[in-house]
Image: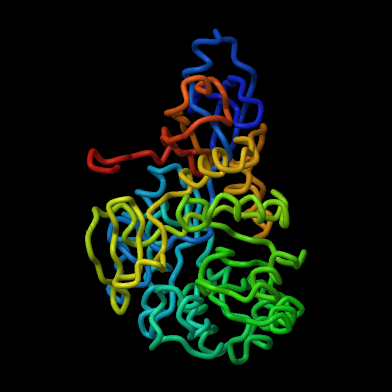
Amino acid sequence: MPQFRARHYRTLLPVDVTIEDDLIADICEADCSDQEAANLPYVSPGLFDIQINGYNGIWFSSPALTTDQVVAVTQSLVNKSVARYFPTLITNSFEALHHGFSTLRQACEQSSLVNDCVAGYHLEGPYISTEDGPRGAHPLQHVRPADYDEFQKLQTASGDRIRLVTLAAEADNAVPFIQQCTADGVVVAVGHSAADTDQIGAAVEAGARLSTHLGNGAHATLPRHPNYLWDQLADDNLWASIIADGWHLPDSVLKCVLRCKSMSRTILTCDVSGFGGCPSGTYAEGDVGVEVLDDGRIVVAGQRQFLAGSGAITGDCIVHMIDACGVSLFDAVRMASVNPAILFDEPLPDLEVGAIATLSLFRLWKSQPESKLQSDNGGSSTFLPIDTFVCGKSRWAPPATDS
């Protein structure tokens, strides 16, 4: 029967948590000194990221992906306090996508760790814009019109686990594709799109519910108005996922998204690249070439103005939102745990008796300024994972080399 003491992510007060079977059996205020409380980690609902492309040099989109690699990435994510996630496959050939989803299905069937942590899969592309900028780092030769028959074959290979599809609103056949996916219970997002106002409106009317990494996968220069960023920000039917790693969006844009969408319809995602966790250098995966820069950015090789996924993890995005936007720890965590659960109709994670014990334990180390070290919103922060419980079990197993 696991028991631990930590600070509640909402109240910031110390609590004693007892886990029995898969559930929180008891949670009560802890009697401890202020000094002891200040040294405790935080406990929150398990972090849930809907866009993970891979990690440590492993890409879920790789045509050579193995089940052992899926297990390795999952363990690395758990070691970073990510309890649940969507493995994400980007634009590729049908054969590569079919292999990736088949391998993910096999990994879920063979590994209890993967099965418990993987909440579904995300297909990002190949039905996206062909234009430079909106296409991002997705290989042009594999971009194609929306094809529901092809999607159904991929869904079968996945074991019916594809729960999110990102496509361009202007893609050929986009509207009937969105309608069919929505009827199947699959969430459709607008992303990597150069759509006009009418095309975005048609996608939303057909059932699109999310903007994928809003503000990224876009032209470097846009008309003042109208443009597809304003259109998506203004549409109350669209939730927004954002990459709050400090590189993908300036702080002013993060604040504007929060004010347009509210904290109840904003989802934090790290969009970590398969080269996340890798040392600086030039890398290639299939038709995608990238550079990992010394400052941590991952960019398209030869086109450093275009980011190619992130090197950050979900917890890094949480602390950046706190520092950049002045939101509370409670609100930042909910955007990376409760909000995705709501959108995808998952059991709501919470810290209460009877809830599934899927929890993240972590510290926030504040480096500066000294006067704000006791503040939960001030200073530059670092996210330090401590433990991760998934379905009542501690899955924490960081190797000595895991950073």
Residue 130 placement (x, y as % from top left): 48, 86
Image position of 18 (left or right of 157): right
Image position of 42 (left or right of 291): right
Could you say which is closer to the camera, residue 66 or residue 45? 45
Q: Which residue is rendered at x = 47% and y = 52% of the image?
A: 117
Q: Which residue is rendered at x = 53% and y = 16% of the image?
A: 37
Could you say which is closer to the camera, residue 206 or residue 395? 206
Residue 240 placement (x, y as % from top left): 64, 61
Could you say which is closer to the camera, residue 328 or residue 60? 328
Residue 82 placement (x, y as % from top left): 46, 47
In the displayed image of the protein, which residue is found farthest to the front? 224
Q: Quadrant of residue 334?
A: top right
Q: Is residue 225 above or below residue 56?
A: below
Q: Which residue is rendered at x = 73% and y = 83% of the image?
A: 198
Q: Is residue 223 above or below residue 149?
A: above
Q: Quadrant of residue 22?
A: top right
| Visual colour scheme | rainbow
Residue 266 seen in the figure: yes
Residue 68 seen in the figure: no
In the displayed image of the protein, which residue is found farthest to the top? 33
Residue 345 placement (x, y as % from top left): 68, 58
Q: Which residue is rendered at x = 65% and y = 66% of the image?
A: 210
